[in-house]
Amino acid sequence: MTPQAATPAYRRLSVEERRRQLLDAALSLFAHRAPEDVSLDDVAEAAGVSRPLVYRYFPGGKQQLYEAALGSAADALRQCFDEPRQGPMLARLARALERYLAFVDEHDTGFSALLRGGSVAETSRTTAIVDGVRRAAAEHILSHLGAADAGPRLRMTVRMWITAVEAASLIWLDEGKQPPADELRDWLVDQFVAVLSVTAARDEQTAALLGAFAPDDRD
């Protein structure tokens, strides 16, 4: 008799592993479709589970699942700016932007729906999650600048630049991801230096920080 191939042993997923599986499936769908175009049946099919099982882990339905998936994506976006404080400042910023643009590239449709708003899944909680990412990015950048005690002009400049990065990312998606991501990254770094230069003419703290790095220190 020909020996039969051994059947792989079934392993029951832990609660956290199953939840992670469902979140990953939801994220993969929300990345390329607007929230209102994704159903719980879609998530169940993508995860290879039943609809009741999705409800078991997310009894609040699609809204709860969307908010959980959004929170997971927000954590990934925060990590984009979590750069080691080593090497030239602009090189650090360029690496953070490279990770950020890679995230935008991977989650194009979902990213657009998230930042443009107007989704039926948008609530005060989802808005707070997105704003939390912006604030975390600003704090990371100010920390890299050594400006934990940043004054209002410097803090406003950094947050304005982050808003510009978001807008540029959305336009980049609209334009078929042109120019190439590395060119957009370098352009945004140049814009960071430019807006700091404008603020430096009116703010001594910003002027002192600007003198700590040069436009060509990103290598």
Image (cartoon, helix red, strand yellow):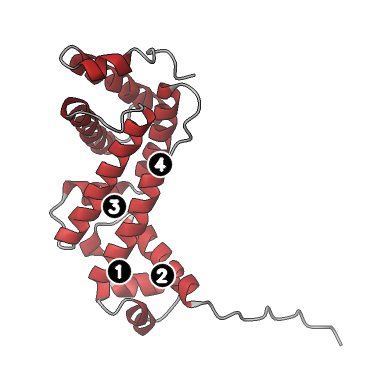
Near mark 3 (Cα within 10 A), the count class, few <14, some 14-19 or many ≥20, is: many
Near mark 4 (Cα within 10 A), the count class, few <14, some 14-19 or many ≥20, is: many
Q: Nearer the viewer, residue 16 or 184?
A: 16
Instruction: Please give the name of the residue rendered at 68% of the width and 78% of the height, measured from the top-left corner.
Output: 8
Type of amino acid at the residue the image marks with label 3: Gly
Marks 3 and 2 close (CB-CB < 8 Å)? no
Marks 1 and 2 close (CB-CB < 8 Å)? yes
Occupied quadrant, residue 181: top left
The residues tagged by marks 3 and 2 sit, at their Cα atoms, a distance apart of 17 Å
Q: Give the label, 4 or 1, closer to the camera.
A: 4
The residues tagged by marks 1 and 3 sit, at their Cα atoms, a distance apart of 14 Å
Which disc, if any, is residue 80?
Answer: 4
Of the two numbered discs 3 and 2 on the same chain, state the one appearing first in sequence. Answer: 2
Q: Which residue is under mark 3? A: 110
Q: Which residue is under mark 2? A: 22
Of the two numbered discs 3 and 4 on the same chain, state the one appearing first in sequence. Answer: 4
Of the two numbered discs 1 and 2 on the same chain, state the one appearing first in sequence. Answer: 2
64 displayed left or right of 117: right
The residues tagged by marks 3 and 4 sit, at their Cα atoms, a distance apart of 17 Å
Specify the quadrant that holds the N terminus.
bottom right
203 displayed left or right of 185: left
Q: Where is residue 78 in the image (x, y as percent from the top left)?
A: 36, 46
Q: Which residue is under mark 1? A: 65
Type of amino acid at the residue the image marks with label 2: Leu
Helix or strand or loop: what does disc 3 sit on? Answer: helix
Instruction: Please give the name of the residue rendered at 25% of the width and 37% of the height, measured from the top-left corner.
Output: 166
Of the two numbered discs 4 and 1 on the same chain, state the one appearing first in sequence. Answer: 1
Residue 106 appears in the picture as rendered: no
The residues tagged by marks 1 and 2 sit, at their Cα atoms, a distance apart of 9 Å
